[in-house]
Amino acid sequence: MHYVYRFSEGSKELRDVLGGKGANLAEMTNLGLPVPPGFTISTAASRAYLTDGILPPELRVEVTTALRAVEDAMSRRLGDFHDPLLVSVRSGAQHSMPGMMDTVLNVGLNDAAVQGLAESSGDERFAWDSYRRLIQMFGKTVLGVPDAVFVDESNRMKALHGMDGEADLDAGALRELVHRYKELVRGECGREFPQHPREQLDLAIEAVFKSWNSERAQLYRRRERIPHDLGTAVNIQAMVFGNLGATSGTGVAFTRDPSSGRPGGYGDYLPNAQGEDVVSGVRNTLALEELAELDEEAYRELLTAMRRLETHYRDLCDIEFTIERGKLWLLQTRVGKRTPSAAFRIATQLVDESLITMDEALTRVSGAQLSQLLFPQFDSLLPRTPLTVGMGASPGAAVGEIAFTNDVAIRRAGEGASVILVRRETNPDDLHGMLAARGVLTARGGKTSHAAVVARGMGTCAVVGAEELQIDPVGRTMRVADMVLSEGDTISIDGTTGEVFAGQVDVVDSAAMVYVEQGLESALVAADSNSAELVTSLHRLLDHADARRRMGVRANADNRVDALKARDRGAEGIGLCRTEHQFLGDRRGLVEALVLAGSPAAEEAALEALLPVQRDAVVEVLEAMDGLPVTIRLLDPPLHEFLPDLVDVAAAAAVAAERGDDDRDRAALVSVLREHRELNPMLGMRGVRLGLKIEGLLRMQIRAICEATDIRLDAAGDPRPEIMVPLVGSVREQQIVRDICRELFPSIRGRSVPIGCMIELPRAALTAYRIAEEADFFSFGTNDLTQTTWGFSRDDVEATFFPTYLRNGVLTISPFETIDADGVGVLVEAGVAGGRRTKPTLPMGVCGEHGGDPESIRFFHDIGLDYVSCSPYRVPIARLEAGRAAVLSPRGEREA
Ligand code: PEP
Ligand code: MG
């Protein structure tokens, strides 16, 4: 095993070893593209460092050998006094973590080499500028000197010389600045800035390894669910310079627009600058096309390289490049992040260009992206107060109050406010604030700035580079011309168009939502040319997903409106009709009357009153889903949910007693309520237990379903009810209910009604082989199964200690949102295996919230469920994800 790989030794398949950046540098090198020579230290070295706390001893030797090869290739020596080679030291993990870890540029410069660089470049100013950049970056990253210390000093120097930016400082001023920076390092760390080039290199490598565990990197990983033990690779590469005057520059290019998906090259270019100037967004950039006017040859060469890379990767690539005195160098490429709408458009564009298949196209989009496309947009027909326009960098519409700092954004978001984080520019330390905010607005920076890249990755709406904005973070105001807004004022930002409005702007359905709700034709009529392409892509990909998926998609719906909505969105039936939802509102009193009935006669009367209500509610959904299965679940929740609150009634009774009023009814109510009070109602008399205890209720529901089916048959409909028993723990419970069903309706006009059960208790999953004997289908209730497996109260924990658990890494995501595959998932698998052991073709689905969660859907496909059932809103997402799952693991079984 070795730790160091020269670029010529790697390939894109070695991402786990070389990190994404290293693997792609190797790939570009092997394609013969102009990549400055270099090598990659593998992630294994980083893991060894993280475990042992020291760099592996062999690493030093391997670095020397590889470094000498770079020196030979460049015919220069690291830190040479006359013609120094300088190197960059950059992090690069397996999964992209933009801006989250450290980078040090210009390593190899010292007091002597800076003279050498001035000599060899013939540009003294450039040499001192490079040196001050090294001291600042190295000081911050390796020596831990706060960046503000350098920034303040630089501002002082600029003021002294009456200049605006570093670019205006001449060689003499920069030399002075370097001198001051070195003093600052000495003062802050009690040591000299290291002069030995190799010491600089070794310390920089170690600092990059350490930055894997910086707070912001950990936060990012938790959010993106990247494992913490992968470690990062480090890329060491000969420096080339974009800051050697007007014929040099640096930029970021995309082979297609990552924001809209528009084909054709796209990007930002900054003449006479180094890479971090582009991503930090400190200076506003030129559009890539403008490079054609500055340096046509380099521009053409770049376009050729971009086409080459896109053909090679068969996907949108983003590229970092530098032009050093007219010579193009490629510093990095990767399959680029993109907005959801760009993802859909690019996927079908590539199919139409015969670069990928429809199956591959499905893997290039995701349900999470689709769900973002369904977010509302601003209503352009309403009067609005435009404030300014920046670049739409991450689409969506966000309305919220202005926060100028991360702290305010986090605090106000924690208090439930919708917040727009407004910054001059953002840097990686702003991640906390960006996570808390609904939207991000910056005055500086291009579409490739950190703010834009991170916001796109998180799906947070962002507008960047709104240059007219004058932000005063101290006075907590922002100004555009004579319009002044303060922290806490409401603004609305449109991450697609870049528009910013004062006050609140109302939102309307997105084009994708119109498509999902009204179909292709209506959506195309309503669409402009941009959204027309999106809608068409969406349609093609959803169609393909439908053709490929093995799992069915049903909806959780309990009334006509929801059922029709679900059907329009492609639901193939109802997987969960919660009958308790049919007794809410005015009807709640009917259930209350049953519970409070003091005599058999009163109970009978209450049930008689309930029957037609239940029957009509079932007719309604059977009609809406005519011809498709409708799984009607018997009453599930604890009865107290239908009763008035004990504390309220007891208080009213006490007040009445105090006043001397004789309120016997209320006093009686208090005693009945006390009787029904349970300390753990979710573990109490609910689900099938309720039906067995109050058998009349159970019989009433079954009769209602039976009569509703009759009514639909009379109306020449095609009703397909299925009865589902909730919270079964023992086969006997299921058997009793099934016997009652059989007694009440042996069959309805020759149709048999399947009687199945929910598997939502660990015992049900573990004894599924027994329960299957009495069940015609299983539906996994993963909400309750999660609750009972973890012992987490589903109604409480997300608001109480989950934030702590997410912060400290006990959880990476709420198990109520994405199935906990290692725990709850194992029980689901056990249930599937048990059920199939007894009845190999037993139909099985899932109807917990996880049925609409993209990652969970993949899991359900893999373990062989037949369908997922989710809220009507998520039906298209589930269709897409089920199709993707089929393409990604065609066998639909979990690997051992
Ligand atoms: C479940 O527990 O997963 C389920 C679907 O039932 P409910 O959410 O109604 O308890
Ligand atoms: Mg349940």
Image: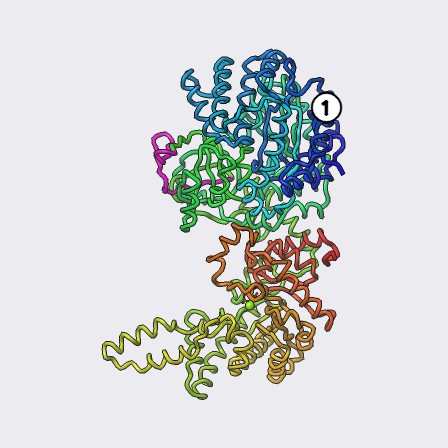
Is 569 displayed left or right of 481 in the figure? Answer: right
Which class describes the residues within 10 Å of circle 1: few (<14), some (14-19), or many (20+)? some
Between residue 93 and residue 843, name the one nearer to us.
93
How far across and how far down the image is residue 535, in percent?
59, 46
Q: Bounds of the magenta span?
A: 473-495
How far across and how far down the image is residue 863, in percent?
69, 60
Residue to which mark 1 is pinned: 68
Is 238 displayed left or right of 454 in the figure? Answer: right
Disc 1 residue type? Arg
Q: Tell me, yes or no, if residue 720 can be seen here.
A: no
Magenta highlight on residue 290 = no
Element at label 1:
helix
By what rule are the colours in the image chosen? rainbow
Q: Which corner quadrant of the figure contains ligand 1?
A: bottom right
Q: Quadrant of the N terminus?
A: top right
Magenta highlight on residue 488 = yes
Q: Tell me, yes or no, if residue 487 can be seen here.
A: yes
How far across and how far down the image is residue 18, in percent?
70, 37
How far across and how far down the image is residue 867, in percent?
65, 62
> At 49% across and 69% down in the image, what residue appears?
581
